[in-house]
Image (cartoon, grey):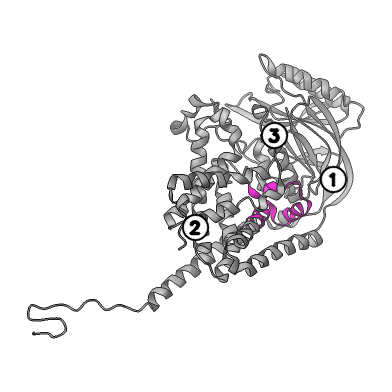
Amino acid sequence: MHKPDHWLASRWRRSVLAVLAGALPVLAFPGPALWWWAFVALVPWILLARTAPDGRRAAYDGWCGGFGFVLAMHHWLLPNLHVFTFVIAALLGALWIPWGLLVRRTLGGAPSRGRVGAALLVLPSAWLLAELVRSWQGLGGPWGMLGASQWQVAPALRLASVGGVWLLSFLVVGVNVAVAVLVAVRRARVPALAGLVATAAAASAAWVWAPRPDTGERVAVGVVQPGVVAGAGSADRRFDREEELTRGLADEGLDLVVWGESSVGHDLDDRPDLARRLAALSRETGADVLVNVDARRSGKPGIYKSSVLVGPEGPTGDRYDKMRLVPFGEYVPFRSLLGWATSVGKAAGEDRMRGTGQVVMDVGDGLRIGPMVCFESAFPDMSRRLAADGAGVLLAQSSTSTFQHTWAPAQHASLAALRAAETGRPMVHATLTGVSAVYDANGTRIGPRLGTGASASQVYEVPVAHGTTPYVRYGDWTVYAALLTLAAWGAAESVRTVRLRRGRPVRPGPRARTAHGSPARPGR
């Protein structure tokens, strides 16, 4: 195995380098949004892990790099979670231990062309395994999936309609592996170049073959973003500002008005005066108003975050209760064990209540909408299910006001482009304090976005799309293919190990020396 140079012989120096290498991909996401950087960002990490002197060091390289990746992607949590941000990064970073081991296994030393060819499939599959595990809502959800960095690249969005963000992550990692091989394993350039050509061919085939959404009629959607409203009585003052902005849309011929997450701070059953004011806004604008109620519900224990549709006569009865809550922000996992997080940061003092199922709402005139709340837009399976259930327009009501001056608002808004492209459905991302944005069924932005400094309303002409994308029809097939690849690799390595052991010549042990003579001449 290739030995690291003297500078890398220090385990602490090497660990710090691995953390920095793992953090590099964050530059491909908003705010910097250097999408092209994603295709080379993993190369330093790969080059480091392949030179690990043994498997234990490769595991550390994977863990430290994963720690750096998770910490960089969630650095904006530091003012709220403080030291617990590092704890989360350390726990989730361990998901990249297998990836580090496989980098060394497939690319360490002087790998053969066969090993390099296997690496082009095995390493992206191992990366997807880490993304799959951390996508579980209890571990924080799929924020910062590598493929999400390609949200503004049209060919990549077309690929997302075929295999979702998973396919994009797979291909981005594959390109990084190929580039690392071109840099460090020149004798294996042929399979590396073949991998790059295959990626380009897949993107081209998707561009030509993937069905485009069938768009027809347009609907006018008004997005209301009140901006930052803080201090005593903020819930009522925010409602007043949203009411004022909505009233300004009265002559726009709207089909729907959307307010952001936590736009109403009181249960409408407890505050019929607010319900009446919302119904009056619906009559003035000629459109239903989708609000988000963040409050204790009359007759039920606990606090819910609920998307509520209000028409000219008041609430229509269509309600969606948020299902996937933000760990520590809206509930504390294993509160009896981790409740101390509330004393060192701004973790939730009381757990929110969960909804039990997704809802498609009928607005009228054939328009059906699929609401999600906050970081639920990061979960590709939720938007996919809404599209399959007949939603014509996807909606995400969000509030990132806690992280107003960080990269979080722009990162959150960018996810709507991916969800739109995956499902072939336009998506509206409406927030309290920005960034609000709307994307068509191809993932292309419609009209201006409302930034974090805006307190305004905006009308968007949204083309309604029909048809079914391959991703909606076939689901997460890329993940299943990755798992099969890893299983096949593991089986092949096991067979190879058994054959090597069976084919290895058995060395005879030393002949026994007796009490009567030498082993060569017994009895003497």
Q: Closer to the camera: disc 2 or disc 1?
A: 2
Report the span colored magenta: 144-173
Q: Tell me whether circle 1 and circle 3 mark residues in contact (CB < 8 Å).
A: no
Q: Answer whether residue 33 is magenta in the image.
A: no
**Residue 409: mark in rendering:** 3
For the residues marked 2 and 1, what is the alpha-carbon distance in whole angstroms? 52 Å
Residue with the most extreme top position: 232
Examine the rendering and report whether any part of residue 200 can be seen: yes
What residue sits 55% from the left and 49% below the top?
133
Q: Answer whether residue 165 is magenta in the image.
A: yes
Which quadrant: the C terminus? bottom left
81 to 233, vertically: above or below: below
**Residue 51: mark in rendering:** 2
Q: Closer to the camera: disc 1 or disc 3?
A: 3
Q: Is label 3 in a helix, a strand or a loop? A: helix
Q: Upstream in the sequence, badge 1 or badge 3?
A: 3
Q: What secondary structure predominates along the stretch shown in magenta?
A: helix
Amino acid of disc 3: Pro
Q: Upstream in the sequence, badge 2 or badge 1?
A: 2
For the residues marked 3 and 2, what is the alpha-carbon distance in whole angstroms? 38 Å
